[in-house]
Amino acid sequence: MNKKSTRGAPAAALPWSDRPWTKHYGPGVPADLKLPKGSLVDLVDASVRRFGAKTALEFFGATTSYRELGIQISRAAAGLKNLGVKAGDRVALVLPNCPQHVIAFHAVLRLGAVVVEHNPLYTDRELRHQFEDHGAVVAIVWDKAVDRVLQLPADVGLRSVVSVELIPAMPLGKRLALRLPLPAARSARAALAAGKPAARVGHTGRTVLPWRRLFDAGALKRRHPRPVPEDLAVLQYTSGTTGAPKGAMLTHANLQANAAQGRAWVPGLKDGRETVYAVLPMFHAYGLTLCMTFALSIGARLVLFPKFDVDLVLKAHRKSPATFLPAVPPIYDRLAAAAAREGVSLEGIRFSISGAMNLPASTVATWEKATGGYLVEGYGLTETSPISVGNPFGPSRKPGTVGVPFPLTDIRVVDPQNVRIDRAPGEAGELLIRGPQVFAGYWKRPQETEEALLEGGWFRTGDIVSVDKDHFVTIRDRIKELIITGGFNVSPTEVEGVLAEYPGVAEVSVVGLPRQGGGEDVVAAVVAAPGSTIDTAALQEFARGHLAAYKVPRRVVVLDVLPRSLIGKVLRREIQDMLVAG
């Protein structure tokens, strides 16, 4: 492949260079946008000043005001500073959605340090890969995951672990109920807490201290240096286009821009009067932007759920009704069905945005009938902070498409083999995106950064799309072979590496098969070594010990051989077709 021809700017004027899609924006959405100056520290400080007495966070009914949130962020930052955290250091967060997650996230940024988000359900193996890559000096960890983090080898650079308990963040009545000697209380307590205090010192000599100890240092001094917009704010791990997870570098400017773009996209929102539900995990790029930054930027009440639970959401909705709900299609389906069954009204949820997988028309119809509001589909990637394209909240939306580019966002549709050649409207090609939300590159991976970020700031998404006459984007296929399951990206290569370690497996290929209602199932095709047989259930159990639950194959199929190309490459597409055909 000719390097110059595939990485250069377009040879001629772009067919959509004047952003004609802006005429399809919803009522009140600006064609242009003036981005806020400053960092995410300034974003939070502005909300603390504007909405001080209003509720910022709600967790099982316990509330935190914006003024209290600002104080706790400052004190947690001072505690981290005493642990030696300085500008540029990486601090790992291994937390579910909880008030401590929001406080820790913004406390790290206040020091000019970098947040690295992790799924708290990751296995030792998955955490080790990422910690070896980013070299965090401090980790703030859910107490149920502390033992896994302490098992990391000494050479990853981790010095201190802060153990976070969720139960102390709940209201007194809820805490007392969890102490009752009843099976239901014991089960709920076990799901939320480790059940034993974390050790003070790990086997590698790392210090372990409880979350509350961070606050002993008092508030951070006012004159502490602040980060600037171009500084790195977050390392968000993604499988990107191929291979093992990579750290996408998101700057303060990237995340500020995407929060502002999201705010402009929904002009019907009222600052200081909205209630946003964080049912999406904030360790995922989608939840991070729409909950951690966007919600706080508009002074919303952010209702936090440690995991999606229909009963918990409906109970919260009775007390603090949601007005804005970002989620994925299965969540909308389950909530609508449960609300109808239990007689709970969902009216008042005016705006809902779906991402990560295809949004069925039936889901839209059911949800909009139940709420009286809009449900639209958007599109984005971790590398675009994440949202870059969305359907308008208004009559111009087009179900079945992912919408049009956000304000200040440009797109191109190009020949995947030669990105200098632009496809005409209506023709399929690879989607390129340019805008202030596009990431700074992959952490410590200059070659992969060069391949992803082209001249002129264009990011190669790896997705094949077409754009209709009105410039609405439809996703057609993916060049990359990532599997999207439950809104999460799964790298087939990573899963294959684990399954290949199981005794008796000679070859393995992992693919995604379409799931009814949207998304995909992870499915493994394996070939047994000569003289061996494979117990598929045992193989799945083996995978559970090394992979997060959503990465474990839902199905394992034993084949005699894997189809290969003339050069010996396993043909995943043929395997997918074979398995779909049964």
Image (cartoon, rainbow, N blue to C red):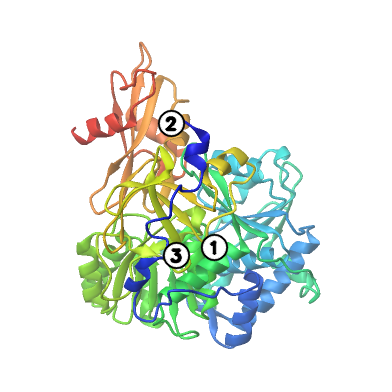
Q: Specify whether 17 is left or right of 163.
A: left
Q: Which residue is mark 2?
A: 496
The quarter of the picture where residue 378 lies is: bottom left
Q: Specify whether 355 is left or right of 517.
A: right
Helix, strand or loop at label 1? It is loop
Q: Which residue is mark 3?
A: 185
Camera-nearest label, 1 or 3: 1
Within-10-Å neighbours for mark 2: few <14, some 14–19, many 20+:
some
- Mark 1 or mark 3: name the one nearer the start of the chain: 3
Helix, strand or loop at label 2? It is helix
- Mark 3 or mark 2: name the one nearer the start of the chain: 3
Identify which residue, 9 or 403, lies in the foreground: 9
Outermost residue toward the top?
531
Q: In the displayed structure, would residue 449 be above or below residue 224?
A: above
The quarter of the picture where residue 141 lies is: bottom right
Identify which residue, 509 or 185, lies in the foreground: 509
Q: Which residue is mark 1?
A: 436
Within-10-Å neighbours for mark 3: few <14, some 14–19, many 20+:
some
Which amino acid lies under the numbered mark 3 shown in the image of this protein? Answer: Ala
The residue that appears at 54% across and 68% down in the rendered structure is: 257
Residue 83 visible at all: yes
